[in-house]
Image (cartoon, coloured by chain):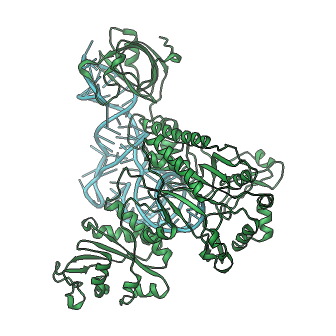
Chain colours: A green, B cyan
Amino acid sequence: MNVAYNQRTHYCGQLRAGDVGKQVTLAGWVNSSRDHGGMTFVDLRDHTGLTQLRFDPKNKAAHDVARDLHNEYVIAVGGTVVSRGEWVNARLPTGEIEIEVTAIDLLSKCDPLPFQVNDDFEANEDLALHYRFLHLRRPEMQRIFRMRHAIAHAMREFFNEKGFLEIETPFLTKSTPEGARDYLVPSRVKAGSFYALPQSPQLFKQLFMIAGFDRYAQIVRCFRDEDLRLDRQPEFTQLDMEMAFVQRDDVMNIVEGCFQRIFKAALGIDIPLPLPRMTEHEAMERFGIDRPDTRFGLELRDITDIVRGVDFTVFREAIEKSGVVKCIVASGGEKLTRKVTDGLTEELRGMGGGGLPLVKVAAAGSQGGSPSSLPPSQGGIEGGLEFQTGIAKFIQPIASQLCQALGAKAGDTIFFMPGKYADVCKYLHHVRSRLGQILEVIPEGKWNLLWIIDFPLLVWNEEENRWDSTHHPFTAPLDEDVHLLESNPGKVRDKAYDLVLNGTEMAGGSIRIHRPDVQKKVFSLLGISDEEANEKFEFLLDALRFGAPPHGGIAFGLDRTVMKLANANSLRDVIAFPKTQRAICPLTNAPGPVSKKQLDELFLSVKMPSK
RNA sequence: GGGGCCGUAGCUCAAUUGGUUAGAGUACCGGACUGUCAAUCCGGUGGUUGCGGGUUCGAAUCCCGUCGGCCUCGCCA
């Protein structure tokens, strides 16, 4: 039976009770079939949803075909929309109707499946990626990629409205100094030379501004050859933009508008503007990280001064080495069993930490006989609070003072971290994140967007004995801090801004250096010689000497944005053909070997690693 | 490069913690059934427990190595 599948009248998610009586043509995949010997039902699926097909034995030809259908067969059907009467399926949008099929065309069969498409269980990821075309057929994947499209479309539309030009930048280019490892492409016509795939179009977009394009925005692929993570793929997509004659606020305002549009397009949510801002310093103090998740409390508290006098070696040594002691107070202690806190300690050890000192706050005498509980005369707390377990016996003398300063109450657990400031931040940020999960205090459905600003321009690199850029070498210092470049480079703050959503960095950018003298000064602080700077960035330094307008911009991760808004588990779920942790594509088996002829053409020979 | 978790039927998982013939659901094959909607019911096929070695009377289970996947530190915006 031929059915004109190129003349579908509806998609599978469209028909409603009001369509009863219509003659329709549908096409799609068999989601499931139920054969009763007589009456046979098939759920037909396309990207819009499901429609139930009814095959009555009285239409014998169609019924015979239907009885031999299997999941994921591709069919086209013609028939009449009929009411389901008393057999409505309330779980389907199309559940009030079904199609009484009079003609069916079996367009394509399907081998036994490696995993079910009409199922929710997570197939082994390696397998799912090997049969990615099947995995992508699942409604959940369809939803994610439709949202991805909606977000990308909203971005393009927004920037077009604001007068931004989309101009493409080269993929075969020269290594730029983002700091990550480059993917290299050998040159055939220039033996022994290599292109690098761009880590970002950073320098090109600055040249666009110097060229006078005024506003540029591009959705562009970027490449970085570093180890993969849940939220890191070797190739990823950014919305990259740059504006001329702007200050920080101008760029931030545009980006806020764009995110407002994105949230509306993807989720129908109205984000109130302007977005809150926080300095990097405040973020580190309160959250231990420059991309804080502000949806919940459990903030870090500095208690260096309170514990300064206490006779506890671990604290004393940290302070003597000009470190700090900070802590987190967690309520709802019954979830913090010994097993859980031991697990946290273990995690910190795995990160290179020394451990996780803690105490529990309890009503005095609540565990009479506990060796760590002391009467007020010996340091216990007047009014009925004392420390128990962990390091209680070492810091009992300041229990009262500490509880008061922290507002701790019975039932709380206090986690301490002594050490170098950077380490304390790192470990306590981890503890805070984990506590948020364990105590279930992270609210769902909350979208906390905020800006982090006033980063230090430079961070000291102890191994190399020089300064590194916090962001990249083209980030401009704050005007009022420029004079510190000579005297105290570590104190210089920059004109960078990061946009953070629920603890994930979504976007990062800055106002750029547009003066050659400042750029040279920064290069020298970074240990990049004039010679080296000329070799690597001659075209940029040239351009800065030929009338560079003040300019700045930002890049934001499209993949991460989709991952967050679609509530996907992994960046792999929002990239159509992603790589595994070893940067392998299980679908194509890339990367793979090439022929000797190809290598010869490129003047390459392969040296395998010795075991 | 380091740390952790995992690998059993095509797929998802189980196997009383070292014990006799490695099970279940699903998929697949055959049969029954005219209102199901993850249809149901009956029967059947399907296993080098990732791979290699070791310990043991005996290994899916313990040990070593190796391959692969995931998480993570380093690395990376």
Relative to A585, is A413 above or below?
below
Quarter of the image where the C terminus of chain A is located = bottom right
Does residue A464 appear anywhere in the picture?
no
Q: Is residue A23 left or right of residue A262?
A: left
Closest to the observer: A530 or A160?
A160
How far across and down, in percent of the image, does residue A349 sit? 43, 72
Relative to A216, is A338 above or below?
below
How far across and down, in percent of the image, does residue A503 sit? 45, 59
Total of numbered circles in the picture?
Answer: 0
Closest to the observer: A88 or A105?
A88
Q: Is residue A234 left or right of residue A566?
A: right
How far across and down, in percent of the image, does residue A522 sit? 70, 70
Relative to A545, is A372 above or below?
below
How far across and down, in percent of the image, does residue A158 sit? 57, 42
At horizontal 40% and vertical 26% (from top left) the residue drawn is A13
Q: Is residue A461 left or right of residue A277?
A: right
Relative to A150, is A392 above or below?
below
Q: Is residue A460 left or right of residue A318?
A: right
Closest to the observer: A397 or A510?
A510
Does residue A387 appear anywhere in the picture?
yes
At horizontal 36% and vertical 12% (from top left) the residue drawn is A21
Q: Quadrant of residue A589?
A: top right
